[in-house]
Amino acid sequence: MGVVYEAEDLDLGRHVALKFLPDELVRDVDALERFRREARAASALNHPNICVIYEVGRHEGRPFLAMEYLEGTTLKQAINGTPMPVETVLDLAMQIADALDAAHSKGIVHRDIKPANIFVTPRGQAKVLDFGLAKMVQPFGVANADTVTELTNAGTSVGTVAYMSPEQVRAKDLDLRTDLFSFGVVLYEMTTGVMPFRGETAGVVSAEILGATPTSPLRINPALPPALESIIDKAIEKDRDFRYQHAGDIRTDLKRVQRGLTAPAASATTTMISPAWTPGSGIDAVTPRPAAGSGSAAATLAPPAQGRLARHWRIIVPAAALIVLGAAAALFVSGSNSATALTERDTIVLADFDNKTGDPVFDETLKQALAVDLGQSPFLNILSDRKVIATLRLMGRPADQLVTGEIARELCQRVGSKAMLAGSISGIGEQYIIGLNAINCTTGDTLVAEQARASGKGEVLKALDGAASQLRAKLGESLASVQKFSTPIDEATTSSLEALKAYSTGRRATSLKGDVAGLPFHQRAVELDPNFAVAYAALAVSYGNLGQATRAIDYAKKAYELRDRVSEREKYRLIAMYHNFATGDLDSADKAFELWRQSYPRDFVAVGNLGSDRMVRGQWESAREAIQEAVNLEPNGIIGRFNLASAELALGRIREAQNSIEQALARSLDAHYLHLALYSVAFLQDDENTMRQQLEWAKGRSGEEDWLLMMQANTEAYHGQLARAREFSRRAADSARHADALETAAVWQSVEALQEAEVGNATAARQSASSALALVSGKDVRTLTALAFARAGDASQARKLAEELNKEFPRDTMTQGYWLPTIQAAIDLHEGRGARAIETLQPALTFELGQPPPFSIGLLYPAYLRGQAYLLERQGREAAREFQKFLDHRGVVLNYPLAALARLGLARAYALGGDAAKARAAYDAFFTLWKNADPDIPILRQAKNEAARLGT
């Protein structure tokens, strides 16, 4: 595109780079227009990681660009065939991502991102170079995008093959995501020292890009953090819909990896990289000389006439090509005493209040009240309790450390927040003075300060509310937003300081130790204030997570009745939760979650619950996307990490699931959910030692032990060891009873009843089902026992329970669409009506791959019964198709016994279809799984007789 010279700006006394259009293009109208458009786009941008364009002009009829002059080396030279230090990779990569984000925000796609086009200064600053192949598009996601405007020569090779995206290789229409693929390739090379696609010819490389999976970066560089490998894998997804969608998202994930390093990363900004060349002193301004590395191409074009240009430029020496476009600068909080408005991307660390009154009722209480008040704002972004706890652990401090003073400031700097908000309360007689102080984390300077006075303890929350509203406005939120989202603190929470203190303590306990730990405090909160809606909501969520559906329903209903006493954000939560737990109407719940997500796009709870609902429906790919988004927003959420691993298992991505859990444990997150996921991964890998380790971890943990015991019960039943399965399921039920989780205990007994029914122990099944109903007759218990009764031949009792469920839960998506058709089909099978069972199960096709409540059981039941119905109708091929689903979706069914019994169903289907060889193989597979099974199990004896008749 041209020749670049080093020059001196005689007006400002600085060195610059001048790029001239070559002689052969000076009179080319199209080339001139492209040059002008490129220059216009470049001059509109300004970003520290993109070479700055100072001026566009002409000299003696030749167009030129005046650009920032750089010293240093290219990233390609810095890599030099060896992996770069992780700290340096992260620092440079975040700068590159920033540059791409800035360019993309202006609709500029680079199309040639590669290490040779990224410059690194001696101070470790990355600069994206050479937008010569760029094109203009509307930013991805904007409707009605205009036609692409090319900024390059017609017929120019669009990019460098080894770094092209699959859509570039195919010469498809491009959008911003093509640069993100190329960036992923660059990250791969930075971390491994080699390129992921490195065939000997361009054709081979193109084929690899389209079809080959690169070697795992961790195999090449074992020192690489697994989370960084996950970022690379997502960036080089071949399908751009599953790739990162925005450069800013990559930067966020890179930042999280940086924070997650066990020790503070060495500053890459101080890493010295030898420059490719530096200007010597006393350069001859009269006789230009080529720069080292510029080659003969630079010398073939005579420099412009010496002397002054229109802008007083003096040519010093031709330089290597340094052209690059700039981008918009980010807003930031000023370090001066006058506040500069925050942006919606900035986070604020909420410090603990300095309680100078000596009254413990204010401990944690005012911080929680302020968090609720500021949390109403769609504008402000308060750092979550989970992130605070995780960062304290990285700082080597206790998770329950008070975050005040220098601790708060250090934490603020570590997480990259713009400001911290410190509060204080002091008492003078009956008067209380509340102070709020927004502080620049870097300098310690005050940005905004507010003070309020309360005439008594009962007026403290109102005074705090007024100060918080003033603060929101001064931090940059619009007056209209402050007024719209302004539910008073005492209405959004409670007017009782004691109840608020109990609630605050419960939230902290839940974040630190899980749902069981927070329950007594939330119970105390509603005892102190029976109208405390948010505390009821917390109870509903915890009981729901712990498998106690009846309590979850009751508390969700109570919270819903009080929904007019909460903030707008909490109102979305209460409505969605009411439909999730009480009505079971997933469509209505998802509408509330979507509205919540639109109003508060940084709130991980809304999008995380959307993902959870998609798991229930069996929409695993979209579920994983939503859950990943939630985890990106809140990487320290235990449930989010568990759900992400569950979705990855369901999609057959065992390694990714294991990485997700290991990353959670590396963050010092720990609860039974994570160990359930580790157990599931180990089961799929036949890793009995790891399974035993999870059982050992759970030993004696009230409210958690029973879940791992029940997982082991399922595994024993999966292998036909029913006596051991009964032992573990009963230990699970006993453990749940001791934890005051009677409904969970009843669920475990119901599961035992189903296991007995499926293997032909009808009497034992009916006894276990009756015992479960006698303990707690909740929704989940009635659902499972109804199915158990139907499978054990008690159609009358099954119908009775099904009618109750149908009457009480007419809007429940999974009751109506999954469980009731399954129960009715089981009754049809018992009565010999296979064709009717198949028809009855038709509605369940939509949901059968899902994970319907109660948690983790009942998976693929409609497919199993449909297979049995086809066997009854002597349709072997159709039956085999249903049973094959269990083998195709091992990550969905996991260790549930039906996964083993489906192999027997497959053998029967092949035998019915006349394929003796396949039937024998399927029988053998079943007998191998059940090689240590209890010999007196009815279904096993029957299977052995069938196989013998077949000739096995």
Image (cartoon, helix red, strand yellow):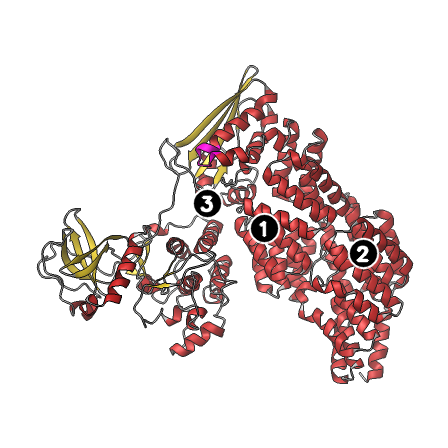
Name the residue located 53 percent from the left edge and 38 percent from the top edge. Answer: 377
Q: Residues within 10 Å of mark 1 (few under 14, many from 20)?
A: many
633, above or below 323, in the image: above
Reading the image, the residue beneath label 3 is 345
Q: Which label lies toward us, 3 or 2?
A: 3
Give residue 784's mark: 2
Left or right of 307 on screen, residue 477: right
The residue where tag 1 is placed is 607
Residue plotted at (73% across, 56% down): 814
Give x and y (percent) for residue 890: 68, 67
Q: Which residues are magenta?
A: 472-479
Whether residue 227 can be seen here: yes
Q: Earlier in the sequence, mark 3 or mark 1?
A: 3
On whether residue 474 falls in the magenta region, the answer is yes
Q: Check if mark 3's residue and mark 2's residue have beta carbons within 8 Å.
A: no
Question: Which amino acid lies under the numbered mark 1 shown in the image of this protein?
Answer: Val
The quadrant where residue 129 appears:
bottom left
Disc 3 crowd, CA 10 A, few/some/many (<14, 14-19, 20+): some
- Kindly state the secondary structure of the residue where label 3 is placed: loop
- Element at label 2: helix
Q: Nearer the viewer, residue 131 or 918?
A: 131
Q: Position of residue 382 (x, y in %)?
A: 51, 40
Q: Position of residue 913 (x, y in %)?
A: 78, 82
Q: Residue at x 28, y 63 (%)?
A: 34
Is 726 positioned to the left or the right of 258 in the image? right
- SS for callout 1: helix
Which corner quadrant of the image does residue 197 belong to? bottom left
The kind of residue on which mark 3 rests is: Arg
Quadrant hosting residue 207: bottom left
